[in-house]
């Protein structure tokens, strides 16, 4: 039995894009050609790989097994290329970095801009999602390195803390507690607050819930809001209060569209962590990004020294 890697790659595209037409468009092939290549792969393995009965092409049980091994095959091929490039010192390539929502929105753009100044021949891509989405792509091998809020756990992950940040409690500027120099949890309870929390699966959500528990406000009314930008707009509109990264509200505080309530005790800082799979060989482009990231001293935009060592 012989496994044709070209046909395997075409099959993987059909699975990823859930259809022969979509895969054909991605591969710049005709739909009949894609279908024929997959059928020939099925014939060589003597099993059906794609369920064609529905509106979308889905892998059969045998197809799911092959797709899982296919990911490993092509990931190993990428690692082989990365190893050769490390030996040859190749300076061109592509960098894909993952970032949890807050980190990917407010930290990575400035770092990638600095990175491209140093390595203009390397193309940069970034995937931003909540922590669960980033971890899934990292585990699947779609992303080599990621920068996330918190300290993830996992035997397969190498985790390195690079920065700290803290959450602040934000309110609309006309909130009754706005303008105070100090706010106690009892003051919040008396005001009958409604807390706007990040979506489940976000590392920020987990920290928000711990802080509210520390303030004995875990039973306060709450709502789920997806993404920090939506959270800020909902708070500004007077829908409630929210704990959010201090770096996510810099512009709004300067513009006066949001206010910070200085609650005591303040939330503990949380680490910003670099994560990668222990068993994955990093490419030269990824290793160069680590050098930039490890040189960070402050979040971009903070007062003080330049955020990166040059």
Image (cartoon, rainbow, N blue to C red):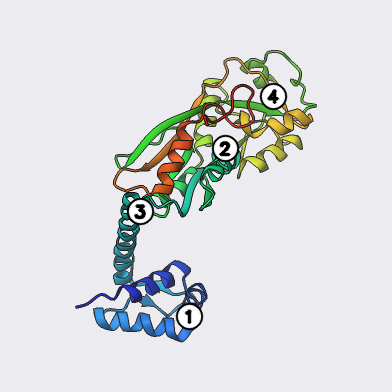
Mark 3 or mark 1: name the one nearer the start of the chain: 1
Q: CA distance from mark 4 to mark 2?
A: 21 Å
Judge from the rendering whether residue 123 lies leftward or rightward of residue 53; answer left or right. right
Say which mark, if any, is on residue 260: 4
Q: Secondary structure at mark 3?
A: helix
Residue at image x 43%, y 30%? 161
Q: CA distance from mark 3 to mark 1?
A: 30 Å
Would you say the residues marked 2 and 1 are in contact, meaning their CB atoms lie under 8 Å apart? no
CA neighbours of label 3 inside 10 A, class few (<14), some (14 to 19), many (20+): some
Q: CA distance from mark 2 to mark 1?
A: 39 Å
Residue situated in front as seen by the camera: 136 or 195:
136
CA neighbours of label 4 inside 10 A, class few (<14), some (14 to 19), many (20+): many
Would you say the residues marked 3 and 4 are in contact, meaning their CB atoms lie under 8 Å apart? no
- Identify the residue position indicated by label 3 in the image: 85
Task: Pinpoint residue 157: horizontal percent, then vertical percent.
Answer: 34, 41
Q: How many marks?
A: 4
Judge depth for marks 4 and 2 and give the one in front: 2
Mark 2 or mark 3: name the one nearer the start of the chain: 3
Mark 1 or mark 4: name the one nearer the start of the chain: 1
- Identify the residue position indicated by label 1 in the image: 29
Judge depth for marks 3 and 1 and give the one in front: 3
Residue situated in front as seen by the camera: 176 or 180:
180
- Identify the residue position indicated by label 2 in the image: 107
């Amino acid at each position: 039995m012989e496994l044709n890697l070209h046909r395997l790659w075409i099959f993987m595209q059909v699975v990823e894009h859930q259809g022969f037409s979509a895969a054909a468009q991605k591969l710049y092939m005709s739909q009949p050609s894609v279908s024929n290549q997959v059928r020939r792969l099925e014939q060589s393995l003597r099993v059906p790989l794609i369920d064609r009965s529905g509106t979308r092409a889905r892998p059969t049980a045998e197809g799911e097994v092959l797709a899982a091994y296919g990911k490993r095959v092509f990931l190993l091929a990428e690692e082989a290329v990365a190893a050769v490039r490390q030996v040859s010192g190749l300076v061109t390539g592509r960098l894909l970095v993952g970032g949890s929502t807050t980190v990917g929105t407010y930290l990575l753009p400035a770092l990638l801009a600095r990175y491209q100044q140093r390595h203009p021949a390397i193309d940069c891509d970034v995937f931003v999602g909540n922590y669960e989405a980033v971890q899934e792509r990292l585990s699947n091998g779609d992303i080599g390195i990621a920068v996330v809020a918190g300290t993830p756990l996992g035997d397969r992950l190498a985790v390195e803390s690079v920065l700290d940040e803290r959450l602040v409690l934000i309110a609309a500027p006309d909130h009754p507690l706005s303008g105070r120099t100090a706010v106690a949890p009892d003051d919040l309870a008396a005001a009958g607050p409604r807390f706007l929390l990040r979506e489940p699966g976000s590392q920020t959500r987990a920290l928000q819930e711990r802080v509210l528990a520390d303030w004995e406000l875990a039973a306060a009314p709450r709502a789920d809001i997806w993404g920090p930008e939506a959270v800020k707009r909902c708070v500004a509109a007077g829908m409630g209060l929210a704990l959010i990264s201090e770096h996510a509200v810099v512009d709004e505080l300067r513009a006066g569209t949001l206010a910070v309530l200085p609650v005591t005790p303040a939330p503990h800082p949380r680490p910003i962590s670099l994560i990668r799979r222990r068993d994955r060989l990093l490419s030269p482009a990824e290793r160069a990004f680590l050098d930039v990231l490890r040189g960070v001293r402050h979040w971009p935009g903070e007062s003080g020294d330049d955020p990166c060592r040059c």
